[in-house]
Image (tube, helix red, strand yellow):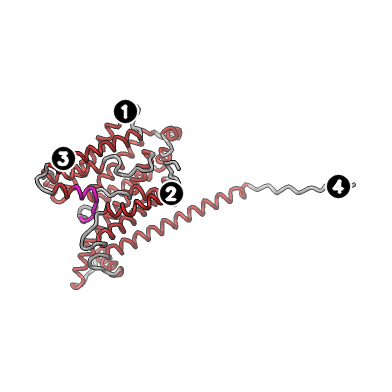
């Protein structure tokens, strides 16, 4: 009598074996993220040193580092090196640092705004803040307001006008059901056109061409007016804003999926949207006040970072400032060296870089907040 042959059953996986693979993947992901963070930080520092040394009078990187160390540590500089030291420390260093701060801030605000309004085309200026700031800058220039602030009068006027524009946008967009993303975007776009019309009227009746040059500065962007005096305020506002937005990474994850989903996760969408809108508006106003409106950075960088690290806002808000700061340093360096001694507006450079990158990203894969 023949016995039936039986195939032995595969052994049951133990609990430790079942969890080993996911745990290994998580460890690998964390390691990759940490390495990317270290690499981007090193790239940012290297870019800053190179950009500080490059200009009408080129200074080698080692010499640039020596001058920077002397300034930070209180070291001595020989008489022969003093003129180059002044160029490095007093002129280029605050400009490069301001470029890094603004680039980091615009990138982070772009991430938050795109989540708040659930629009892949949103950027820091979609809510009319930059147009309002431009009106403030032109008003101060034409009527001589805030003269007690000296060289910071125009920047202060732009910042105050940006805050007023923010309050106006939010107040008009508010309804009985709160502020919805669509109403917020539509109100911001409409008021932006209104602010531009006010600027056009002011320029038309201006007795001199000063208003025109001021508007060009605020609409195309520049770091030419960077000083050590203007850097601390905007740096503090941007740094604090980045920390606050990163703490709300989970809220941004939920709100990017829609208000109903966010509410099911226990997120008070009305209160959180108002809070994050205020943070992004203050950051944008501070940056516009010292650099004017610089397009495409807050639009492109969030998409690039999401492609690399995913859509989780805790990771995106950690990587985006480094990418934005490095990008802005190189854009500013090109703007002041390509046609030296003249300087190209930053808005021109970011558009020349941003348009082809955006088209490439659009054809490469679908966006997080959009369709295919």
Tell me the distance, in whole angstroms, between the alpha carbons under discs 2 and 3: 41 Å
**Nearest to N terminus: mark 2 or mark 3:** 3
Is 266 located above or below residue 329 in the figure? above
Q: Which residue is mark 4?
A: 3
Q: Which of pointers 4 and 2 lies earlier in the amino acid sequence? A: 4
**Disc 1 target residue:** 175
Residue matched to label 3: 201
Left or right of 190 on screen, residue 246: right
Mark yes or no: residue 228 visible.
no
Q: Residue 309 vs residue 162: left or right?
A: right
Describe residue 322's horizontal placement relative to residue 130 as left or right: right
The residues tagged by marks 2 and 1 sit, at their Cα atoms, a distance apart of 38 Å
**Earlier along the polypeptide chain: callout 2 or callout 1?**
1
Q: Quadrant of residue 123?
A: top left
Crowding at dot 4, Cα within 10 Å, few <14 / some 14-19 / many 20+, comes out as: few
User: Could you say whether the residue bearing mark 2 is in a helix, strand or loop?
Assistant: helix
Q: Which residues are magenta?
A: 215-224
Residue 114 occupies quadrant: top left
State whether residue 157 is above or below residue 175: below
Q: How far apart in space, not on screen, are marks 1 and 4 (Cα)?
A: 81 Å
Q: Which residue lies under the disc numbered 2? A: 363
Quadrant including the C terminus: top left
Comes first in the chain, label 1 or label 4: 4
Callout in the foreground (4, 3): 3
């Amino acid at each position: 009598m023949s016995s039936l042959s039986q195939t032995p059953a595969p052994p049951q996986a133990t609990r430790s074996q079942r969890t080993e693979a996911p745990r290994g993947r998580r460890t690998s992901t964390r390691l990759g993220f940490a390495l990317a963070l270290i690499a981007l930080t090193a790239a940012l520092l290297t870019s800053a040193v190179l950009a500080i040394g490059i200009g009408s009078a080129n200074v080698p990187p080692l010499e640039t580092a020596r001058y920077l160390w002397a300034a930070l540590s209180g070291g001595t500089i020989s008489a022969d090196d003093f003129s180059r030291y002044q160029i490095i420390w007093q002129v280029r260093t605050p400009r490069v640092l301001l470029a890094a701060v603004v680039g980091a801030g615009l990138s982070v605000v772009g991430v938050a705004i795109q989540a708040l309004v659930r629009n892949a085309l949103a950027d820091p200026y979609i809510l009319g803040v930059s147009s309002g700031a431009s009106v403030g800058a032109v008003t101060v220039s034409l009527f001589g307001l805030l003269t007690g602030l000296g060289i910071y009068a125009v920047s202060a006027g732009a910042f105050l006008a940006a805050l007023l524009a923010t309050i106006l946008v939010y107040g008009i967009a508010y309804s009985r059901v709160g502020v919805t993303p669509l109403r917020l975007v539509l109100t911001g776009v409409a008021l932006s056109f209104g602010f531009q019309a006010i600027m056009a009227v002011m320029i038309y009746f201006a007795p001199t061409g000063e208003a025109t040059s001021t508007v060009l500065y605020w609409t195309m962007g520049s770091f030419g007016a960077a000083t050590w005096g203007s850097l601390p305020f905007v740096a503090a506002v941007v740094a604090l804003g980045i920390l606050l937005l990163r703490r709300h990474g989970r809220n941004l994850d939920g709100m990017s999926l829609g208000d109903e989903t966010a509410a099911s996760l226990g997120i008070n969408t009305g209160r959180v949207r108002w809070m994050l809108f205020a943070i992004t508006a203050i950051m944008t106003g501070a940056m516009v006040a010292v650099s004017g409106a610089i397009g495409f950075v807050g639009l492109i960088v969030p998409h690039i970072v999401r492609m690399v690290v995913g859509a989780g806002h805790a990771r995106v808000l950690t990587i985006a400032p480094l990418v934005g700061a490095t990008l802005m340093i190189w854009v500013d360096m090109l703007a002041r060296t390509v046609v030296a001694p003249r300087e190209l507006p930053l808005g021109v450079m970011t558009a020349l870089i941003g348009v082809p990158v955006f088209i490439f990203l659009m054809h490469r894969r679908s966006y997080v907040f959009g369709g295919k």
